[in-house]
Image: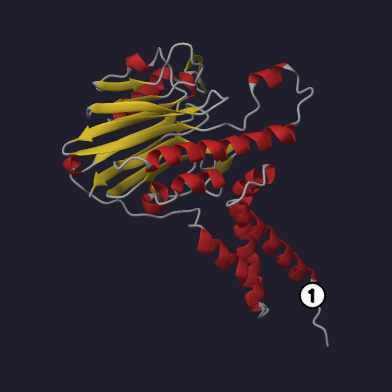
Amino acid sequence: MKPTLSKIDKFSITVLIVLVLGIVSSFFNFGILSVLFSVIMPLLFIINCLLSICGVIKKKYFTLIGVIIYLTFYSFFFQISTKIDVKPLDSFSLITYNAREFKQYVADDPKHNASTKIIKFVDSLNADIIAFQESSYKDVKKINGYPFIFIGYRDNIDKSLLTIYSKYPIINQGYVDFPNTKNNAIYADIKIKQDTIRVYNCHLQSFIINQYVIADNYKNVNYWKHLNNTNTKQIAQAHLIKSHADKSNLKTIICGDFNSTQYSQTYRILKDSMKDSYITNGNGFGKTYSFFKYPLQLDHFLYGRKIKVISHDNFNLKLSDHEPIYVKFKIK
């Protein structure tokens, strides 16, 4: 007798297929579908877990396949880690933050922008290295205590400003230019005692509809094409950064606003052979961006060989559309 499938069985199989397609999309560019899957992957996993529980109760163990496949390819999206106490001399700290040009208005003080509060926040953490995306040429000079600064500004080159501040000497610096976009990446080789590390500060292509589209009142806009092109650009930009980093023999940290979640092909390219500080030592959802209160990780700290994570902290400042990450590292 041919076994019959109930409605819940058919739904379970459908969700399983969608989950598998989502995982495959993190290896291949399916355009806007890859973007969608990278956002909803945690929800698909939760639904699979609930269906698996029902399946186990009914002795239909095929429902476990989705959970097993997910855990094979990804770390859990909610982390619980224990901080390691180390002496300050044993570690160095970094901040990555898309500051939105220090212009976002503060909810409790609408007459002023976030510039002063961002500077106070950075000063309170007293990090050794700061990487700002969407920085401000005017405000960079208001941050004190950093004798070495790389302001990624070049005359006649229209790029979103990236800056790197360091309490340690910057002995080399440069750019990883992305073609046909205002987005960009910069890097600094920083001498920390007897070691030299390379820090990449990245701002990858954004999915946000730009001001020219808004000014056109959304007319004649092919949204599907726009989002597909953005995803393709991100992947190409990730390849450029990773290729550049792979040519260096230095201990490497890649940080910044990837505008991509940990389920994207962009993230997978950059993370190849590296580790993620959130996965190693983060807590909670690791949210750096809210999409209608839906938590997303779009900002990341990746680190290579001979570097150890001591702590990883996320914040909820609401002084920009992104949130900062503060990480302590130790050179092995």
The answer, for residue 223, to whether it is visible in the render is yes
* Dot 1 crowding, Cα within 10 Å, few <14, some 14–19, many 20+: few
Q: Which residue is mark 1?
A: 5
Q: Does residue 68 lie above or below 1 as drawn? A: above
Quadrant of the rendered structure where residue 43 is?
bottom right
Which residue shows up at 35% across the image and 40% down it? 253
Which residue shows up at 36% across the image and 22% down it? 119
Q: Quadrant of the N terminus?
A: bottom right
> Is label 1 in a helix, a strand or a loop?
loop
Quadrant of the rendered structure where residue 188 is?
top left
Residue lying furthest front in this view? 247
Residue situated in front as seen by the camera: 33 or 184: 184
Q: Does residue 304 lie above or below 3 as drawn? A: above
Which residue shows up at 42% across the image and 52% down it? 279
Q: Does residue 226 lie above or below 145 as drawn? A: below
Q: Does residue 7 lie above or below 264 as drawn? A: below
| Kind of residue at disc 1 | Leu
* For residue 27, side relative to residue 133 (left or right): right
The image position of residue 179, as x and y in percent, is: 54, 27
The image position of residue 299, as x and y in percent, is: 47, 38
Residue situated in front as seen by the camera: 2 or 5: 2
* For residue 205, side relative to residue 1 (left or right): left
Residue lying furthest right in this view? 1
* For residue 187, side relative to residue 146 (left or right): right
* For residue 316, side relative to residue 260 (left or right): left
The image position of residue 55, as x and y in percent, is: 66, 74
Which residue shows up at 79% across the image and 24% down it? 220
The answer, for residue 259, to whether it is visible in the render is no
Residue situated in front as seen by the camera: 207 or 182: 182
